[in-house]
Image (tube, rainbow, N blue to C red):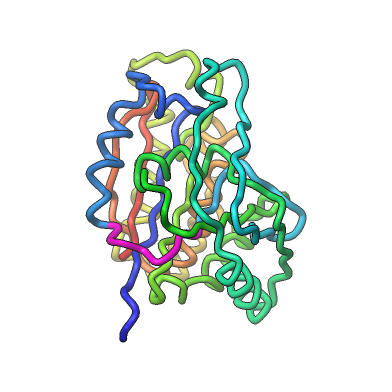
């Protein structure tokens, strides 16, 4: 039987647990997530790269039943009682490690690491049944964009084996600006988003041209205003590396008053 092909998705996960608490500043994001569900099919497994886990070596969750990590502070008590009992996928974790090694990328397995909110918040919306085995992959703490593109390339074949690859971050992550909740026009935010959408979706770019744009993302207009530290952007690089071609823009809306984007590679 031929394996079903799964897409690759980069999405915003919002602010902490707020998308799960009915926060009005996340309504557009939640609507998008519900609308994208049919495009994701029924994956056999999920590989998710969250902005909230960095290691010196690429690290892969390999436990059977990962716990949740409530890595946020100052939210209502219910935020710390959320559940997402999705099973782990140790066999997939080992396969990911093998694929990385075959491509010259050193990695390690962790059977103790749980799922942070960059994993369970979007997955509770997309796959609320929590019945699809899931593996989380760390970022590298050197935050090197080219390295993250290479990680994605090494894992690209997983899509053809019905593993859904999700990059969970935010294309705009200036926390001071986000926390102001101002819905007024922010031309710096707008210009960076226009650049990012063009870099990811313009079909006229040869693959090497697109790669160079993403490697040199910090040279984009107002890049460091929108991403003072790039951990929330780099899950996109993993997705772009795995996707290997132009993406489709599937969300171009506002979260907490700021424009953010989501991309899908089929």
Residue 136 in picture, x, y percent from top left: 57, 54
Residue situated in front as seen by the camera: 158 or 225: 158
Q: Residue at x 40, y 28 (%)?
A: 19
Q: Is residue 59 magenta?
A: no
Please tell me whether residue 43 belongs to the stretch shown in magenta. yes
Horizontal side of 160 relative to 56 (left or right) equals left
Residue at 42 percent of width and 15 percent of height: 181
* Quarter of the image with the C terminus in it: bottom left
Residue 204 coordinates in the image, percent (x, y): 30, 65
Residue 220 visible within the image: yes
Q: Is residue 14 above or below residue 257?
A: below
Question: Is residue 27 shown above or below 52?
Answer: above
- Residue 164 figure quarter: bottom left
The residue lying toward the viewer, choosing from 63 and 106, is 63
State how many labels appear.
Answer: 0
Q: Position of residue 89 (x, y in %)?
A: 55, 63
Name which residue lies at 26% across and 41% down. Answer: 34
Residue at image point 55% right, 19% down: 176
Q: Name the quadrant of the N terminus.
A: bottom left
The residue furthest bottom is: 1
Q: Is residue 25 left or right of residue 60?
A: left
Image-quadrant location for residue 184: top left
Percent x, y of residue 241: 49, 65
- Asked whether residue 186 is in view, the answer is no
The magenta stretch is 40-47
Residue at far right of view: 56
């Amino acid at each position: 039987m031929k394996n079903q092909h799964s897409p690759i998705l980069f999405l915003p996960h919002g602010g902490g647990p707020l998308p799960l608490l009915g926060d009005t500043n996340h309504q557009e994001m939640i609507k998008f997530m519900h609308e994208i569900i049919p495009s994701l099919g029924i994956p056999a497994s999920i590989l998710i790269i969250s902005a909230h886990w960095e290691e010196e070596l690429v690290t892969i969750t390999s436990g059977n039943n990962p716990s949740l990590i409530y890595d946020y502070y100052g939210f209502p008590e219910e935020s710390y009682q959320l559940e997402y009992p999705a099973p782990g996928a140790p066999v997939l974790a080992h396969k990911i490690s093998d694929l990385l090694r075959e491509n010259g990328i050193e990695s390690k397995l962790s059977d103790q690491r749980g799922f942070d909110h960059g994993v369970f918040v979007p997955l509770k919306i997309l796959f609320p049944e929590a019945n699809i085995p899931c593996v989380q992959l760390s970022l590298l703490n050197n935050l090197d964009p080219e390295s993250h593109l290479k990680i994605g390339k090494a894992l690209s074949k997983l899509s053809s084996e019905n593993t859904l690859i999700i990059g969970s971050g935010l294309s705009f992550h200036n926390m001071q600006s986000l926390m102001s909740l101002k819905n007024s026009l922010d031309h710096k935010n707008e210009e960076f988003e226009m650049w990012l959408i063009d870099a990811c979706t313009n079909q006229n770019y040869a693959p090497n041209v697109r790669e160079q744009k993403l490697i040199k993302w910090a040279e984009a207009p107002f890049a460091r205003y929108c991403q003072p530290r790039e951990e929330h952007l780099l899950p996109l690089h993993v997705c772009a590396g795995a996707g290997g071609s132009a993406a489709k823009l599937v969300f171009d809306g506002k979260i907490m008053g700021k424009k953010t984007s989501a991309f899908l590679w089929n």
